[in-house]
Image (cartoon, rainbow, N blue to C red):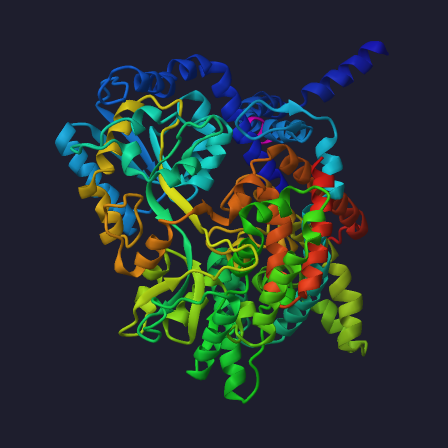
Amino acid sequence: MQTSTNAYRAGLIAAAVAVAAAGLTACGSADKPGGSASTSAAGAAAPTGIADKGSKEFTYWSMWQQNEPQAKVIKKAADDFTAATGIKVNIQWQGRDVITKLTPTLKTGAAADLVDQSVNALGALVAKDATSDLSGLYATKVTGEDKTIGEVIPDSYKSFLNDKNGKPFIAPYEVSSEGLWYDAAKFPDLAANPPKTWGDLIKLFDDAKAKGMAPVAVPGDDKYWVLLTLQRTLGTDGLKKLASDKTGAAWDDPKVLAAAQKVQDLRDKGYFIKGYESSKSIDEEGNWAKGQAAFYLSGTWVPSEAAPNATPGFTFDSIQLPALDSDNTDTGINFFGFAVPKTASHSDAAEKFISFFMKKEELSGIATQAVNLTPRTDIDPPAQLASISKALTGTVYADQGHLSVDYADWTNKMLNPEMIRLVTGQDSAAKFVANGKQGTVDYWKSAS
Amino acid sequence: MTSTTLGARQRRVQGSPLARRRRRVFGPFVAPALILYTVLFMVPTGYSFYASFTTWDGFSDPRWKGTFNYQHLTRDPAFKDAFFNTLKLLFGCGIFLFVLSFGFMLLLREMKGRRFVQGFIFLPHIVSGVALAAFWGFLLSHDGMANKALHSVGAGPVDWLKPEWQFKAILAAIVWINVGYYVTILMAGVDRIPPYYYEEAKLAGTNAWQRFRHITLPMSWDVIGTAAVLWTIGTVKIFEFILAFSGSQGNLPTTNQWTSALYVYGETIGGTSPIYDFGRACAGAVVTLVAVVLVVVVLRRATSRDRLEL
């Protein structure tokens, strides 16, 4: 019986936590130095900034699966680290739900000394005050280099890497963002002359139509078109207000309707590829890479993911959406990186590994092998991502306005379904706005 | 008189030496299962009931919130979707499934090679839901097999999986997955009916419908009842098919495709930014559990007949 199974599963976690809490709280607090000691070490003179407990090994729970390119880069670094320091790295490839798996162990002494995930996913640990303050690590020199970790991470990124007390909780090793992807072999002049207005963008889509391609590949459950158009129209704060304004009045701003209307027009005027309503991102990414559509709005993972499907000569490149009403041309940014649970018993070894992995020689693998962006500006981005990398040197904002973290429930239950209804034409722009307003009012009423 | 009564009672209590010995080993035999069942099942269920009255992130200590979570459920459109979708599965799918299963069963009984066909329609039931979801996606996607078949006869394409049809596609898939299983159960029930009833009925000049109405149906009634209860319990378990079919890249399906199992998942550890609201999820699970128990009780009542001894 599923209810019972769920009940049973929830209860099992409860039992585990309860037993652990009762029996082992002492252990938990004894293990705390992992967090607090490194903070004080930052202030103290310790040249490394890491409170050395002399650990000879540590356990790393990874968000990657063993065969993923990122995993290979990290595995190589771990082997190099062991060879250089003699500290053993116990790696477990847990996959994307690593944080969910780790959570039940946190109270009693985390099962892992090092974990990695996106800023968003790690947010769940931060909310529970379960991550170590990495200030000490940030003040530590990158292994074998002159600069500290804090210095190799651009300042414009820092505010997104801090907890509510302004202390860093994540050491990012991969940066992601979104762009409008295209084949530069088919649009050779586009990189030099990106569209500056929505009108330019539409003209570009008309060009694609004239070339016999569907202008835009878009999955039926797409969120980027509506979200990014709203962000461009309202600005990042305006976007957040749609969620935070409990009266729903933020939805009355005519700009919201104008943004939604733009998305509706894309559909109504036939710019979206045929049959997209029933497709998923993986299908449309493939359609686009096979040349069935000219543009595809998605993340930095596209070049590595779509490469096997790409037609010969396909040259990956991307542009950013043009400025709209708000004149906002900021670029959304998301981070993947390491965090050290507060109750980790070998936090010193884990932090040493981070410092080792951040060195140019190791971290470059993320760009060269995994075809992704790193936070270090002195590591060349892969050619496919050079345009996005350049965009990220400008002003950045937390990807998707951080809605999926700050207002996760609202986003899952209200915004996402409404965006899908708009993109797939089940609702008009006006209906989207009306539903969005009512949905937000109802959401806050039910949440109070 | 008193001593006679006492003696009789004692004899009843003690019974034969065999019964006494049986009683002695009863405890040791039952205890392991009982302890396991209590620790792994009853206690967590009880705890979930308690947790449904708290705010709990599965990590910190639960905080007592009274009926807050239940009040929230009445206003939460996602829970309403999940609950009604579960009912749609239970009754909508259920009625269709049973009619279809009966149809298949009657057809198969008269057929040559019935074991093969039965095995064939049973097959989806033993394949993992995730694989079936992938197959169903291939079948119905815009470039999928169904549209290719339509194309070859000059028709289509049809957007089978457009958002407003997606849950219907799930309902159809659930029927497809389960029909073989229920055909097998019903077939086993019907196979017990001795052929001479039918022979005699045929001699009496009955038609096929009359034989079904007056022999097959009443004599397999207890099997139908059990199958209905199994189905009721099974519907609240439907989870991984929907997650694999409608979710993508770690994202949850949209709430209009949630069932009560997905609701529990979505409110706790599901999705790319999990919510960890175990209290609310437990409340949802409790409401569903109560609803299912009610349906099962009603079903048992409705289908209880005197068992026919064959």
Q: Quadrant of the C terminus of chain B?
A: bottom right
Q: Which residues are magenta?
A: B37-41
Q: Is residue A185 left or right of residue B286?
A: left
Q: What residue is at 18 percent from the left and 38 percent from the top?
A: A79
Work out whether A247 lies above or below A22: below
Residue reaching furthest to the right:
B1
Q: Nearer the viewer, residue B12 or A118?
A: A118
Where residue A150 sits, quadrant-wise, is top left
Residue A405 falls left or right of residue A140: right
Compared with A440, A220 (above or below) is below
Residue at 62% from the left image edge and 71% from the top image edge? B109
Nearest to the observer: residue A19 or residue B196: A19
Residue A121 in the image: state x and y as whole percent: 46, 40
Q: Note whether A149 is above or below B189 in the view shown.
A: above
Q: Is residue A256 visible?
A: yes
Choose between B229 and A55: the one closer to the eye: A55
